[in-house]
Amino acid sequence: MTCSLFDDIVVETIIFGPHCPRPRSRIMSVRINELLEYVRGGRIMDAMKEFYAEDTVMTEPAYGDTVGLTANLEREQAFVDSVKEFKNFEARAVAVDGDTSVYENVMDWVGTDGSDYHVEQVVVARWNGEGKIIHERFYYNQA
């Protein structure tokens, strides 16, 4: 028995157990994994444009809420500009339920100041019906 995600993608039921997940969860599983591939490939700004809604809100311990895609693009570009070299992006766990995704990840990079950075975080996102993130919250310890 199989669960069809889209017309051209079929996943064996063994991955999901005896019942297929809700269709929305299956679509969101595809979207979050696409997003993570963009980030792994260093396409952070492209990911922002592809996966985030115009009215998205991103919440970080260090910055609070950043509202709107334009403001988030500016904030993310400032981060990208502060990176000399990305060393690692690893998603250790990914889960989806309905319109919510959660992933745990580890990132390592060298800043333009020559400092090494290591972040372990959990990211929770809510998605709209168009497959775009409307709210994303990062959980990590500030060092």
Image: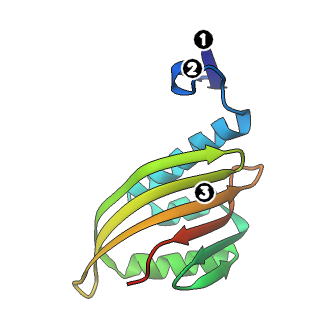
| Quadrant of the image containing the C terminus | bottom left
Between 118 and 66, the one lying in front of the other is 118
Residue at label 1? 1
- Relative image position of residue 100 (x, y in whole percent): 67, 52
In percent of width and height, residue 47 lies at: 53, 59
- Please tell me which of labels 3 and 1 falls first in the chain: 1
Report how far apart the C-alphas of labels 3 and 1 lie in the structure: 33 Å
Q: In the rendered structure, which disc, 2 or 3, sits on the residue that comes first in sequence? A: 2
- The amino acid sitting under disc 2 is Thr
Judging from the image, what secondary structure is the residue with disc 2 in?
A: helix
User: x%, y% of residue 54?
Assistant: 72, 68
Of callouts 1 and 2, which one flags the residue occurring earlier in the amino acid sequence? 1
Q: CA distance from mark 1 to mark 2?
A: 6 Å
* Front-most of residues 53 and 60: 60
Q: Is residue 132 left or right of residue 141?
A: right
For label 1, the SS is loop
Q: Check disc 2: other Cα within 10 Å, few if <14, some if 14-19, many if 20+.
A: some
Residue holding disc 2: 13
